[in-house]
Image (cartoon, grey):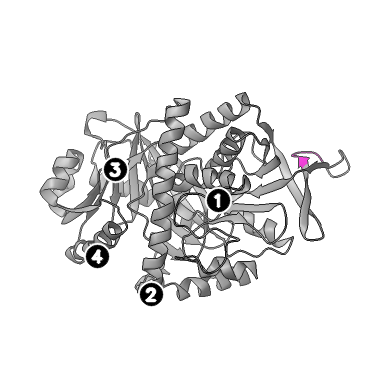
Amino acid sequence: MNTIVLGAGIIGISTAWHLRERGHEVTVIDRQPGAALETSFANAAQISVSYCEPWANRSAPWKALKWMFDKEAPLLFRPRMDWDQWRWCLRFLAQCNDAAFARNVQQIVALGAYSHAALKDMVRATGIEYHRLERGIAHFYTDQKSFDDAAHAVELMRRFGVQRRIVSKDELLQIEPAFRAYGDRITGGTYTSTDESGDARVFTQQLAQRCTERGVRFLYGHDVLRLNRVGDAIESVAVRARGISAGGQKDQILKADAVVVACGSYSAPLLRTVGVDLPIYPGKGYSATFPLLKPEGAPMVSTIDDGKKIAMSRLGDFLRVAGTIELGGWDLSLDSPLARARCHMLSRRIEQILPGVCDTRTPEEGGNPQYWTGLRPATPTNIPFIGRTRLGGLWVNAGHGTLGWTHGAGSGKAMAELISGERPAMDFRFLGEGATRQGANPLSIAARA
């Protein structure tokens, strides 16, 4: 089968790899000059099967209101005159209850476990090296109430087979001694030994190279102009090389048996042009990558700081710190006052937790941190859309939010299996399936209407 994959992030490249492994002819199209140069470029680096709670929970509406005027808030809602934003928020509010939370966790954990196994298989098959650390993931708390509440999340995760456990402050500091200087502020934590970390960009780019070696065709530096619909099916994709004016070169029309839309946040507006409406909205996330001044004092266990809802992961001689989400449209700037405040918060927080370990000086202070921002393709449930649309030949693999790296390998494998007529071996509600399957995602059902 001739398949076109739109998007060269971890989701698109993983899809291309698994399709090619099953004998499909594959073309990957991306507007960037290479793979993993947008949302997969500088994320938190965590493969976090055990730390995947949906944003929507019973306390989320109150927290969102409380944080609206805090520039450094973990989740910052910036209202706009944008119907898609408000419609997304209404659907999000509908998920802010205990029953929906548990249902959504089940789906996310199922995909996470399947994806982690797929990633391990891919690493064994390819030998890709990407600063991988199989040291688990820790999560520390700085107030007693949050630590007490963590017990409920641990119990829910264990119900779905995730071996996340509560640990005391002393045990947490034994697991990761790098936090001893901050230890008097830590109340306790949780830990999962089976999780891991690594550089998503390095992995994706190396996987793309292996795809090329196996015959996958890449059209980098090309914009997707439109999906060409004929009746109830997608017949072809129109693309144009970037930098070429409309009159300077004829559009390329690429025909395919199947088209996979894996464009992250940009998937939703592209799909709406052919009448497929999915609730995916961009969440602007931030990261900072700091050079290590004292490598011996840097953490080797990837860790979540609950106080600021940020994650930190060791990547060789650097520490990657990532977190915070803005729901405020498509802005990718790093030079606005708000963006600078959120970036500088990452610098200050790491200096508090790991004093003197990293070069956390801001550019204004003479430092050179690698600040970055990307748009996380969020769904109201935090469950991605994977599967077929109502249009023949049109498939979707998008909406992974902050878990694109965690779910990337398995989402690509599942997509390839579905296109090949197979049913992935996990209890997950795929787009295009009937509404009777256990754990069905009602948003997916609504999107098919």
Secondary element at image label 4: helix
Which comes sooner in the sequence, label 4 or label 1? 4
Residue corresponding to mark 4: 152
Residue depth check, mark 2 versus mark 1: number of the one nearer the observer? 2
Which comes sooner in the sequence, label 1 or label 3? 3
Secondary element at image label 2: loop
Say which residue appears at 36% left-offset and 60% top-offset.
53
Residue depth check, mark 1 versus mark 3: number of the one nearer the observer? 3
Q: Quadrant of the C terminus?
A: bottom right
Say which residue appears at 70% left-offset and 47% top-offset.
258
Secondary element at image label 1: loop
| Residue density around tag 4, few if under 14, some if 14–19, many if 20 or more, within 10 Å | few
Q: Which residues are magenta?
A: 240-244
- CB-based contact (under 8 Å), mark 4 and mark 1: no
The amino acid marked with disc number 1 is: Ser
Vertically, is 347 above or below 327? above
From mark 4 to mark 2, how far is it between C-alphas? Answer: 14 Å
Vertically, is 384 above or below 348? below
Residue corresponding to mark 1: 333
Vertically, is 197 above or below 190? above
The amino acid marked with disc number 2 is: Asn
Percent of width and height locating residue 261: 64, 50
Which comes sooner in the sequence, label 4 or label 2? 2
